[in-house]
Each structure stands twice: as C-alpha cells, then as structure tokens.
Amino acid sequence: MTVETTIQHFFDKYPEMYSTREECFDHLFCVIGNGYEWKWGQLVYVDVLDNTDEEEVRSWHEQDYTVKHSRACQSEENIKARQKLDAIFVRAGLMKTNAKHDWYPLSKKYSRLFQIPSDAKPDWKDAVEECKKMLERDGIDWKNAEE
C-alpha cells in the first residue's frame, strides 16, 4: 500500500475524522496504539497482518477501499455534510479556522515517526519527512520528543 492510497482510505472511509494530510499523518506516525505496524517497509493495519502476506494485503486493500469507498464517500453529499459540521463547530467556538493542527504528543519510544525500518519504501520515508516538516511548521520540536 502506498502512502497516498492509505491517506485516501482515511479520507474515504472516515471523512468526518480525516480531511487533511496532517490528520492522517498524525494518526499514522504520532498516535500510540493506532493499530498500525511497520511491515514490508510500510505501515499496515495490524488486523490484516495475522496469516496474511504482502500480496494479500495489497489485494484486499485495493478491492475493499478503492472500489467500495472511494466513489461513495467522496460524494458531494458527504463533502457538504462535512462542511456544514465544520461550520457549526467554528460558530460554537469548538474549532478555529486556519488553526494549527493539534498533534498527538510524540514519544521517541512508541511513535512510528521514530521507528522507521531500514527497509521502508521510499514513499513512506518521504511521508515521515513531510510529517516532520508539518510538526516543525506547527511549532513542535519533534527532535526533542519525550523518550
């Protein structure tokens, strides 16, 4: 699974939770216990790892997420519903426009950001670097994260 396919899965299957790359990268690389593990040079959801090889995971992912969710979840109706919900949160003071992302606290010991395997695929290495730049942009000193 590529980084872009994984991000698209988040956008498609959970549009109410993930609408930006920051939200996806936060979940993948920062959140502890998110259900993802490094396997085959990429982050893979743990539920699919038992008795499964890389080809099966890729096949399952492409069939399930790409076919079933991409078209349906990116419908105009779903996008408008997300925009209405965001507007309600902004009016209620629960969400700010143009605000920095509220990142999960980093842990050098547990965050996937710090556990990049030597066999990580190039797009996943690039995603980790992109995440680090996002953290820096939002004023987070990832280099001095807690152990």
Image: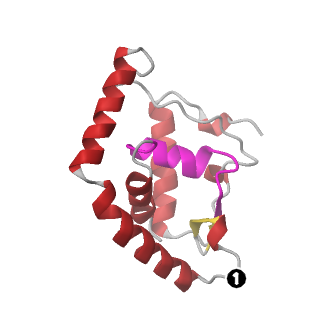
Q: Is residue 145 magenta?
A: no
Residue positioned 33% across, 55% down in the render = 73
In the image, residue 100 sits, relative to residue 57, either above or below, namely above
Q: Quadrant of the C terminus?
A: top right
- Residue 34 sits inside the magenta stretch: yes
Could you say whether the residue bearing mark 1 is in a helix, strand or loop? loop
* Residue 97 visible (yes or no): no
Measuring from the top left, give residue 3's x and y in whole percent: 45, 62
Q: What residue is rendered at 41% in x and 77% in y?
A: 63
> What is the magenta range?
17-37
| Closer-to-camera residue (37/142) | 37
Where 48 falls versus 53 (above or below)?
above
What colour scheme does the image use? Answer: secondary structure
- Dot 1 corresponds to which residue? 51
In which image quadrant can residue 22 be found?
top left
Q: Residue furthest left?
A: 76
Task: Give whichever of 42, 114 is nearer the camera.
Answer: 42
**Callout 1 environment at 10 Å: few (<14), some (14 to 19), or many (20+)?**
few
* Quarter where residue 144 is shown: top right
The image position of residue 122, as x and y in percent, is: 47, 68
Residue type, mark 1 in image: Asn
Relative to 124, say whether 41 is above or below.
below
